[in-house]
Amino acid sequence: MASKINADEFVDREGEDKPTLPKGVVLSGVTTITTAVVAENEVANSTGINAGIITSTHFAGNLTGDVNAGIVTVTSQTVVGSAVTISASGIDIGAGVITATSYAGSGANLTGIGATIMVWDYTPDPYVDEVAVDAGIGITFNQKIKAGSGNVTLRIAGAAGTVVENFGVGSSVTIANNEISFTPTSDLDQNVTYFVDIPSSSLTNMAGDSYVGTGYTFQTTYILEQMWAIGKNQYGQLGQNQAEAGLNGASSPVQIPGATWKTFRRSSNGQDVAAIKTDGTLWTWGSNNYGQLGQNIQGDNLSSPTQVPGTWTPFNNSQNAFSGGGCNKIVKTDGTLWTWGNSFYGALGHNDNVKRSSPVQVGSDTTWSSVVGDRISTLALKTDGTLWSFGQNEYGELGLNNKTDRSSPTQIPGTTWAILGRSQGTSQGAIKTDGTLWVWGRNQTGVLGLNNQTEYSSPKQIPGTTWANIAFSEQIQAMATKTDGTLWMWGTGGFGGTGHNNTTQYSSPKQIPGTTWDTENFKTTNYNSHALKTDGTLWSWGYNNDGNLGQNNRTVYSSPIQVGSNTNWKQLGGTSHITLLGAHVPSST
């Protein structure tokens, strides 16, 4: 008969070895076992327990060998039913549910999961820019998924934007375990914001539970490569490296030397040009009467591109600098704001009226995202959605509800500003994150689009919630696009500059026919206008005394007419004196 021993610890007896225990002994209340031989080939010691089936309130460390029966309860896991098998190859649970605070691994091989379908990763990431135009789109989920019903949709700008393409789930949308991927049939347009819409029920998990859906945006990069110009050349602004005696204008596009251009600035008076190459370097040429070329000299014009030191943020619709009256205003990649050139009314933002012939930083902030302006006033946007202004305020164009000039940045009320309008000084506009368009300043010809000619010193809304961009031509006309690809113009209408096939003045937005206008790339200045369509074609209309319409003539047109037959135009800018064009030419051409 086996004995029963109750003890807290076994120790040596007067130098003798520790006792051995016969088979069948039951130990209870044992705190520490240094070494104990339980039976033949069964040992309990400081290394562990080498025995048969063990019953315990919990286990620590690793279990080795096959354990497939006899486990009653453990506090660190739940075993459901007799179908549970734990072996060297893993844990096989034939039924029941596993709960845990976290899981490791991709989850691609898990089935029957009751957890909500969630996104783990996006490609490209939401809200990023600089996405390649030929990039594929993909999403990784927290569990294996399969096709539901419905299509994935790619749109321009937002949820209500123009549809680019629909992708059938399970056909053009590839599903692989917990990932989906799809690629547009054609390259995306450069410098365009796209919206990915994955509706509810379009995907399910393996149990048939529907995904709630998602929507997000990303922006494509610039791929201009080539740069072209049309118009006057009295200061060498066509960039043809000509001597002063040979500075002839061009009534059809001429190429500016170089094949690595990325983007250019929309200048407001056309006498000088600034452009950025794919390596982030900034180049200027043309008039330098106020040192606006940033070369640390004043008065020497340049007829070919010359580099300005530094690395700069590519200009787009809201990240451009204007040179009205001879100044430049640009945001760098580090979020700093730099200005130079002429400084009427403190429009450079340095709290003075001093001209500068090389770039000087405005303050010390590193959260600037975009800037527009000319020689007399400036608007600048920060990453937190706040809008700032400085310069002349004769007509309330600073939007501060007064007419006091400012020589350093002063905030306009609001924290949801998103896009700056392109302006030449006294009439201003900007778009908020909700798609509403707000205008203020001079309004002599109804150019603010408020159906009157009243000046406003604080922002006033133009009806609508789907506005994409806006540009002003001083006191002459205004031009704006909506997210649905429509183009709108209003103002004096002289020389047919508003594109409505007449010379009538309009004080509220009036649509130009068509729904495929590029929402970013258009410009209006001094009674003439240019715009790109989404098919890469260029259109122009209005005043044409300098041949600036690119039609190889000086004929006035009061409605849009296509310039040439090219379909690879990607970016547009310029003024009444010069039109700048960017083109992407595929390597196969």
Image (cartoon, rainbow, N blue to C red):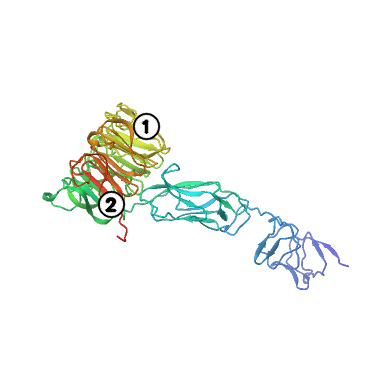
Residue 407 visible in the picture: no
Q: Nearer the viewer, mark 2 or mark 1?
A: 2
Measured as percent of width and height from the top left, residue 427 is found at: 29, 33
Measured as percent of width and height from the top left, residue 243 is found at: 13, 52
Measured as percent of width and height from the top left, residue 224 is found at: 30, 53
Q: What amino acid type is highlighted by mark number 1?
A: Ile
Along the line of sight, which residue is nearer the eye, 50 or 383?
Answer: 383
Mark 1, residue position:
462
Q: Which mark is residue 553?
A: none
Q: Earlier in the sequence, mark 2 or mark 1?
A: 1
Mark 2, residue position:
566
Distance in Å between CA atoms under marks 2 and 1: 35 Å
Placement of 532 over or under 416, stated as above or below: below
Instruction: Specify few, some or many for label 1: CA neighbours under 10 Å numbering under 14, 14-19, or 20 or more.
Output: some
Along the line of sight, which residue is nearer the eye, 4 or 161?
Answer: 161
Instruction: Specify few, some or many for label 2: CA neighbours under 10 Å numbering under 14, 14-19, or 20 or more.
Output: few
Tell me the quarter of the image containing the C terminus.
Answer: bottom left
Along the line of sight, which residue is nearer the eye, 98 or 560?
Answer: 560
Residue furthest toward the left? 245
- Point 66% across, 54% down: residue: 98
Quarter of the rendering containing residue 328: top left
Placement of 486 over or under 586, stated as above or below: above
Give the number of marks. 2
Residue 9 visible in the picture: yes
Residue furthest toward the bottom? 40
